[in-house]
Image: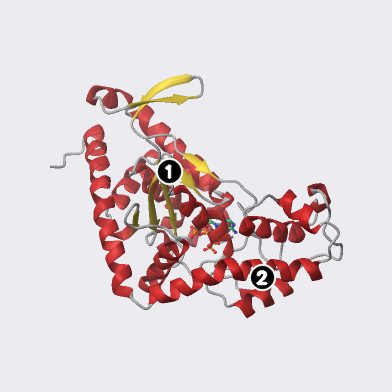
Amino acid sequence: KPLVFSGVQPTGNLHLGNYLGAIRKFVALQENNDCIYCVVDLHSLTATLVHPDLADQTRSITAAFLAAGIDPKKHIVFNQARVSQHAELAWIFNCVARIGWMNRMTQFKDKAGKDRENASLGLLAYPSLMAADILLYRATHVPVGEDQKQHLELTRDIAQKFNNDFSSRIADLGIGVEMQVGEETVNGFFPLTEPLIGGPAARIMSLRDGSKKMSKSDPSDLSRINLTDDADTISKKIRKAKTDPAGLPSELDGLAGRPEAENLVGIYAGLADITKEEVLRQFAGQQFSVFKPALADLAVDKLAPIAGEMRRLMADPAYIDSVLRDGGQRAGALAERTMKSVREIIGLLGD
Ligand code: AQP
């Protein structure tokens, strides 16, 4: 049965990239799937250990999930630290994964910068914890932005190596499921999870530099639209967004080599839930002086209700905490079921 899992780090204000690349997909997937959405607070320690406002940021991401339309009664919403099995499985995956796999991760290279010796061990092991988040629930599908593609591939590598290393134990215990690996049908415990990436907004770029992704940690606030920005701020940021002097073309080819223009078209398409081709059909030949105000109106239209609902929810932290507590209990029960099997497969004495 398909099961959807995804997470967002409480590392700052959520932006349009997080919303279009991830959260909006979370909302849509609720319709036909069981979903588990997690505020991955343990991940947020990998870059900065001391977060004076970690608890409030965790609540704020939860508020964004709920405000965007995630139903915490039908699905599960919780924060990672409540379910200690995430850290337990991550340790086991640290022993499954190879250092070379981790060293190749572009996110590690980008975030560690030149001084790799001084990066936290957690930053290097980040993908192992992410694999644990997903596989603890034996999730089959993970909606993420394009930047997480490599981590999802590594999650599959970890699952495959675990299944392979313990294949006879899994068979002896009779707890495997049949799955296709290339041409072969194998019996494994962990599924080979599929990433759900794609659409026009899988990688939203900075409004100031079309070669960098929109990011919470960019020092320039003008580089991103935060979910909580008011209408004037959204309009100002779009007006100031970098573009080129040409107008909008009628075909996608006309955006080649124009990353900033392509990004704004992608944002419009993502917000309006149409393709980039459709946006160009609508605005072909128009100047940015026409397109930018239309984009600003659309962004305000879509984001203002979410910001309003987030503010309302944030005024009641006890309610948010109760959602996380309830979700944590339900997630914890599922997680313990998987961990019991994992301990048994490996031969770790538990209860
Ligand atoms: N620019 C983006 N375009 C599309 N999707 C994006 N995501 C992030 N940036 C973009 C997706 O949002 C989800 C949650 O991301 P995260 O909280 O795990 O943080 P991150 O990927 O490290 O991205 P940020 O927000 O830019 O944070 P910093 O600045 O700390 O690196 C993920 O599904 C991600 O793909």
Please tell me which residue lies in front, 187 or 93.
Answer: 187
Q: Position of residue 10 (x, y in %)?
A: 43, 65
Report whether 86 appears left or right of 247.
left
Q: Position of residue 195 (x, y in %)?
A: 51, 42
User: Dot 2: what SS?
Assistant: helix
Residue 301 vs residue 316, the one in the foreground:
301
Task: Identify the element where label 1 is drawn.
Answer: loop
Report the residue at 51% width, 40% height from top: 153
Residue 269 is labelled as none
Residue placed under numbered mark 2 in the picture: 297
- Which is more toward the observer, 317 or 147? 317
Question: x%, y% of residue 173?
Answer: 23, 26
Check the image and report above or below for 65 versus 316: above
**With respect to residue 144, does 243 lie above or below?**
below
Quadrant where the N terminus is found in the figure: top left
> What amino acid is labelled 2 in the image?
Asp
Label 2 environment density (alpha carbons within 10 Å; few <14, some 14–19, many ≥20)? few
| Disc 1 and disc 2 in contact, CB within 8 angstroms | no
Residue drawn 66% across the image and 59% down it: 267
Q: Are there few (<14), some (14-19), or many (20+) residues within 10 Å of tag 1?
A: few
View extreme (left): residue: 351
What residue would you read off at disc 1? 32
User: Which residue is at 37% across, 69% downward?
Assistant: 59
Calculate the distance from the C-alpha at mark 1 to the C-alpha at mark 2.
Answer: 31 Å
Asked whether the viewer can see residue 249, the reply is: yes
User: Which of marks 2 and 1 precedes in the sequence?
Assistant: 1
Residue located farthest toward the top when viewing the structure as drawn: 184
- In which quadrant will I find the C terminus? top left
Residue 175 image offset from top left, x and y in percent: 27, 28
What's the amino acid at mark 1?
Asn
Report the front residue among 157 and 310: 310
